[in-house]
Image: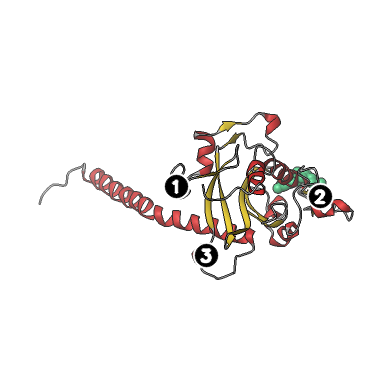
Amino acid sequence: MVEESPLRPFYTVLVLAFVCSALVAGAAVGLRPLQEANRRLDQQKHILFAAGLYREGGDVAAMFAPIETRVVELASGRFVPEEEVDPEGYRQLQAAYSDGRALAADQDPAKIRHLEKYSLVYLVKEGERTDQIILPVRGKGLWSTMYAYVALDGDLRTIRGVSFYEHGETPGLGGEVENRRWLEGFRGKEVYGQGGEVLLSVVQGGAGEGPDAVHQVDGISGATLTVKGVNNLLEFWFGEHGFRPFIDNLQRGGTSNG
Ligand SMILES: Cc1cc2nc3c(=O)[nH]c(=O)nc-3n(C[C@H](O)[C@H](O)[C@H](O)COP(=O)(O)O)c2cc1C
């Protein structure tokens, strides 16, 4: 009978650990494209939802197909040609840190701290006419950074819809920012006042009935601090450091042709 080496259990464990780690690493790498595809579909779903074009159970990729994805330079508001920045490969949130600029506290009501040079925007066209634009926005709530898409009508002042797709606010309190019934309150509200100032805001205690009502959305009870974060992000992204130059550019007749 051959005598068993005392090292045999050690080698067995080593080989088993090696095989298992190779399997786990292989699965992680192999599934990455699938995860990326699912993440992209989820984003598309929220963009469609903000635009009011999402149909439950429909093919998201097919619904998204007519939407044009473009890159915009935030400071100038100009469309950036694909040869300069490819929208397909552009990672906006990473770019805020790698290629963006630090925001001074007085420029940063949304508390995002770093602002990217370029932003993705999504255009819904009807022939040559832009029917709506969908803008990615983000800002600090009570506990977390909240991410959303805001769809603006072709008149460039009226909200078509809003979709919060990621946040870490408390479910049932600040987490109600993703409640579709509440989000419905944004539809038809106007962003800018007569002088071009950002007046769109969520009002705790309920929107008023006077002339300002067209800019006001009902609040969320028990979530005053999250709602303050929503107002701050609206103020920032519709303001001069956000999409205001882009909106002005479109208003002056800027085209999406480069
Ligand atoms: C466990 C816990 C979670 C909370 N989560 C939130 C939240 O997500 N958003 C928020 O605005 N307030 C949240 N609050 C409440 C705030 O602390 C604060 O009381 C509230 O924003 C005041 O708003 P109200 O005047 O609408 O009640 C939370 C409180 C507790 C105890």
The one nearer the camera, 131 or 241, is 131
Q: Residue at x 74, y 47 (%)?
A: 227
Q: CA distance from mark 2 to mark 3?
A: 33 Å
Is residue 6 depicted above or below 215 in this figure? above
Say whether marks 2 and 3 touch (CB < 8 Å). no
Is residue 56 depicted above or below 159 in this figure? below
Q: CA distance from mark 1 to mark 2?
A: 38 Å
| Amino acid type at mark 2 | Val
For the residues carrying marks 1 and 2, which lies nearer the camera in this image?
Answer: 1
For the residues carrying marks 3 and 1, which lies nearer the camera in this image?
Answer: 1
Would residue 146 appear left or right of 193 to someone viewing this image?
Answer: left
User: Can you give x and y, in whole percent of width and height, for residue 208 in the image?
Assistant: 87, 53
| Amino acid type at mark 1 | Gly
User: Can you give x and y, in whole percent of width and height, for residue 90 in the image?
Assistant: 47, 45
Residue wearing tag 3? 60
Q: CA distance from mark 3 to mark 1?
A: 20 Å
Query: How packed is label 2: few (under 14 Cα within 10 Å), some, or many (20 or more)?
Result: some
Is residue 54 at least partly visible in the picture? yes
Disc on the earlier residue, 2 or 3: 3
* Local secondary structure at mark 2: strand
The one nearer the camera, 133 or 99, is 133
Would residue 2 appear left or right of 66 to someone viewing this image?
Answer: left
Query: How packed is label 3: few (under 14 Cα within 10 Å), some, or many (20 or more)?
Result: some
Say whether marks 3 and 1 touch (CB < 8 Å). no
Residue wearing tag 1? 89
Q: Residue at x 50, y 63 (%)?
A: 65
Q: Residue at x 17, y 44 (%)?
A: 5
* Local secondary structure at mark 1: loop
Label of residue 72 in the image:
none
User: Can you give x and y, in whole percent of width and height, for residue 236 in the image?
Assistant: 69, 40
Is residue 111 depicted above or below 132 in this figure? above
Residue wearing tag 2? 203
